[in-house]
Amino acid sequence: MTATATSVGEPDRTRPQDTPPSRAAAWLLRLLPAVAAALSGVLLYFSFPPRTLWWLALPAFAGFGWALRGRGWKAGLGLGYLFGLGFLLPLLVWTGVEVGPGPWLALAAIEAVFVALVGAGAAAVSKLPGWPLWAAALWTAGEAARARVPFEGFPWGKIAFGQADGVFLPLAAVGGTPVLGFAVVLCGFGLHEAVRLAVRARRTGEVRRGAAAVALLSVAVPLVGAVAARPLVSDEAEDGTATIAVIQGNVPRAGLDFNAQRRAVLDHHARETRRLAAEVAAGEVDRPDFVLWPENSSDIDPFANPDARAVIDRAARAIGVPISVGGVVERDGKLLNEQILWDPDKGPVDTYDKRQIQPFGEYLPLRSLIGAINDEWTSMVSQDFSRGSEPGVFTMAGTEVGLVTCYEAAFDWAVRSEVTDGAQMISVPSNNATFGRSEMTYQQLAMSRVRAVEHSRTVAVPVTSGVSAIIMPDGTVTQKTGMFVADSLVQEVPLRSSQTPATRLGVAPEIVLVLVAAGGLGWAVGAGVRGRRAGGV
């Protein structure tokens, strides 16, 4: 009989051999985490307004977690940067609407560095038990840093600001934007871990009960917490009601050159106020208790220009109630972005100066350096605005109205200070005309919705060119305007004085989460050092 067995040590060519992957396939496998990180960042962008796809944040962080888990910190740094670019490049495209792509690309590139650092830390803690907790806390720490440096910070793109329509929103009343954002990120990372363990169990039959419990809790606790926080969200009128009017006068044209039409902008807002007064006189709408104009509604200083003062006086007398006017004022050699409380009989009686001013828009950091690179930018911001130092709460017809001017709405402290100073409602006067019809105005409106729930206050958003809105303390938008139209909104709104846990706790929840992040990172570094020592490295 002929032997068919192969000789010892000789490969059995009667069985198919494993084919090594091609070089192209190997490169694709190596690139897969990078592609996943970048696409997850894009997915996170799509969870933000004007879309109402808030839930996309969960698979976005699940995908980011898949890309990071088990990798070294250097790989995490690169993957985090790709995730940050995928998210921030489309989110911040509005910053280049009128000034070109340079500032937009630079801003996104710098802000993505913070996400890269989070990615490095998250990769390091991904080998620890309960890693979704540590990684989510690290994300919160990254947001905390981004909200403070450089140039006083840039909190735009906080995860909380994409959740105005989501089920997690009540958590804003528990611990503000840090707790709301932490819950979303924890749920996303927990979702990845739950899926990973389920796939592993199906493939190997191995069930790691402790890890599975942590993964499920990472998903369940944020959801249960959001449901439990629902009683904190209320639009009950604790201090009665006020009938407010929000004026959107519109601008002659969009873009940076709207400032060249300063008198026309003032005339538009005065005209819309007089039109509202005529409707009130005709009995078509209720008479408001007070009127809210947007930021930059009078870029002509009414204290120095009698003509501008006369225009505002006529509008105030026509409506017969106090108006909060957004003006640009020069006082004692300082240029101020100011809200002016204008009484129909007494004229200007109180002011609030914007405290959180916008770098490269209202003041120019590193002026000499930037002037050497591009003198066009220094001519655009020829004089720096000065910062105010005190919270702004106007007493308008017996109602305490907190003023949060435009960019300030992105900063936790700037909104909270008005509520702790006695505000029964909040006004966010804004000017978005320089950003055209971009998504910026919708992103900012979502911030105001989150702030309404965070502090349980009605929020009015008067904007020069739209979208102006009235927001209930539960975050619901009850009225809003279109963009680049003249319009007014009149509504009776609840006034409230109780403080949510978020208002009372202030920065404390953020500090706790930063400490949790530090603890997880310290544990990961210590474990790595011990591992290298044990291996004799």
Image (tube, rainbow, N blue to C red):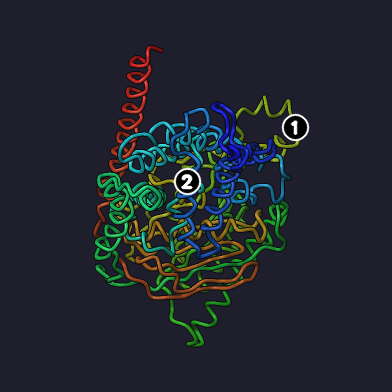
Quarter occupied by the N terminus: top right
Quadrant assignment, res 394: bottom left
Q: Position of residue 196 (x, y in %)?
A: 41, 48
Q: Is residue 114 visible?
A: yes
Residue drawn 54% across the image and 37% down it: 79
The answer to whether 384 is drawn above or below residue 405 in the figure is: above
Q: Residue 303: x, y in percent?
A: 55, 50
- Tell me residue 474's x, y (percent): 35, 66
| Residue lying at 67% horizontally and 58% vertically, measured from the top left | 436
Badge 1 density bin: few <14, some 14–19, many ≥20, Cα 10 Å = few
Amino acid type at mark 2: Asp
Say what amino acid the circle numbered 1 marks.
Asp
Location of mark 2 (residue): 353
Between residue 92 and residue 375, name the one nearer to us.
92
Residue nearest the observer in this picture, 9 or 255: 9
> Can residue 415 be spotted in the picture?
no
Q: Secondary structure at mark 1?
A: helix
Q: Earlier in the sequence, mark 2 or mark 1?
A: 2
Calculate the distance from the C-alpha at mark 2 to the C-alpha at mark 1: 28 Å
Cβ–Cβ below 8 Å for labels 2 and 1? no
**Rendered residue at 45%/63% (across/down):** 343
